[in-house]
């Protein structure tokens, strides 16, 4: 699974496909405004230790470094990380680059980061709670974990509408990876292995892993007047993403620096 997803994202970089774009020159004028449109980082990351998790590609890392943060970027794709190296070198920025799965952050010390930023990526692992636990261990008490995920419905719904709309054809309570998606899909990434995570896992798993959710936003991408089957049209009926702001609380950290876990 890991190797297939690595190859798929390396190939997406080679082809210049969506979600592999580096930061634009205009983004550097006000990098924090680009990266924090919700205002959750309170206007400054100067001096903050930021982990950009599964966020290779030459955008998140260099923009946060430009804003004054001490930045580490972790990604599975070597090609995506090479874009971070190149962009950092071109702009004279210090960015630590680490090739690893989001499920393995063992190379980092406990409480080593003040902020963890994770764009849409948890759909590529079968156990989202395993990721949450890794993030909990490396996030300092009071630190923030800002993550974006694909909503369950967007992974259940058909790509093209029927006469009655976008049908939910994938079961909500499912195990194993989703069926492959056709090349050129605007809703999923062809060639990758993806998994559907239920709300109990997305939200409940985050809380049980040592975080308190402070905010939740559903970015709006929909346009009901767009061409049926396009990302914008489908997003008007099937919500694509959810963004979570969660805080690591000291009361939930045990003597080893890890989260105190419990099960429902």
Image: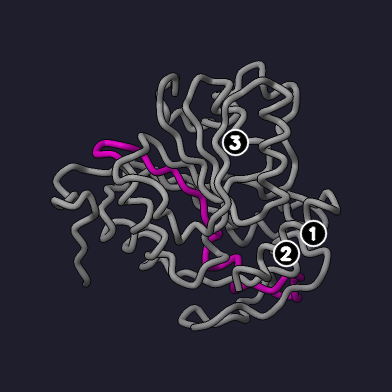
Residue 146 appears at what percent x and percent y?
A: 44, 43
Residue found at x 58% / y 51%: 99
Q: Which residue is mark 2?
A: 7
Neighbour tally class for label 3: few under 14, some 14-19, many 20 plus, Cα within 10 Å: many
Find numbered disc 2 in the image and state the secondary structure of the residue it sits on.
Answer: helix
Q: Quadrant of residue 28?
A: top right
The magenta stretch spans residue 144: yes
Q: Which residue is mark 3?
A: 60
Image quarter where the C terminus lies is bottom left
- Check contact, mark 3 vs mark 1: CB within 8 A: no
Residue in front for this viewpoint, 208 or 4:
4
Residue found at x 54% / y 20%: 67
Q: Which of disc 1 and disc 3 is earlier in sequence?
A: 1
Q: Is residue 41 above or below residue 260?
A: above
Find numbered disc 3 in the image and state the secondary structure of the residue it sits on.
Answer: helix
The magenta stretch spans residue 15: no
Image quarter where the N terminus lies is bottom right
Give left or right: position of 109 versus 73: left
Residue found at x 60% / y 65%: 154
Q: Which residues are magenta?
A: 140-164
Q: For the view shown, which residue lies furthest in the top direction?
A: 29
Q: Is residue 245 above or below residue 149?
A: above
Residue 239 appears at what percent x and percent y?
A: 58, 57
Point out the frontmost of discs 2 and 3.
2
Point out the frontmost of discs 3 and 1.
1
């Amino acid at each position: 699974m890991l190797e297939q997803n690595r190859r798929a994202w390396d190939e997406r970089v080679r082809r210049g496909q969506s979600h592999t774009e580096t930061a634009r020159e205009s983004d550097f004028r006000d990098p924090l405004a680009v990266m924090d449109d919700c205002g959750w980082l309170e206007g400054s990351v100067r001096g903050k230790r930021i982990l950009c998790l599964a966020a290779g590609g030459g955008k998140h890392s260099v923009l946060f470094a430009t804003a004054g943060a001490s930045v580490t970027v972790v990604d599975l794709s070597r090609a995506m990380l090479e874009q971070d190296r190149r962009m950092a070198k071109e702009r004279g920025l210090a960015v630590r680059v680490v090739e690893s799965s989001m499920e393995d952050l063992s190379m980092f010390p406990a409480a080593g980061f003040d902020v963890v930023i994770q764009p849409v990526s948890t759909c590529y692992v079968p156990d989202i709670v395993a990721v949450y636990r890794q993030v909990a261990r490396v996030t300092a008490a009071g630190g923030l974990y800002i993550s974006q995920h694909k909503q369950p419905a967007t992974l259940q719904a058909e790509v093209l509408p029927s006469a009655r709309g976008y049908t939910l054809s994938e079961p909500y309570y499912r195990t194993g990876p989703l069926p492959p998606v056709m090349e050129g899909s605007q809703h999923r990434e062809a060639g990758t292995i993806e998994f559907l995570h239920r709300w109990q896992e997305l939200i409940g798993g985050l809380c049980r892993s040592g975080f308190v959710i402070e905010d939740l936003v559903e970015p709006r991408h929909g346009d009901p007047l767009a061409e049926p089957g396009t990302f914008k049209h489908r997003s008007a009926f099937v919500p694509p993403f959810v963004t979570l702001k969660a805080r690591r609380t000291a009361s939930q950290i045990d003597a080893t620096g890890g989260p105190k876990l419990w099960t429902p």
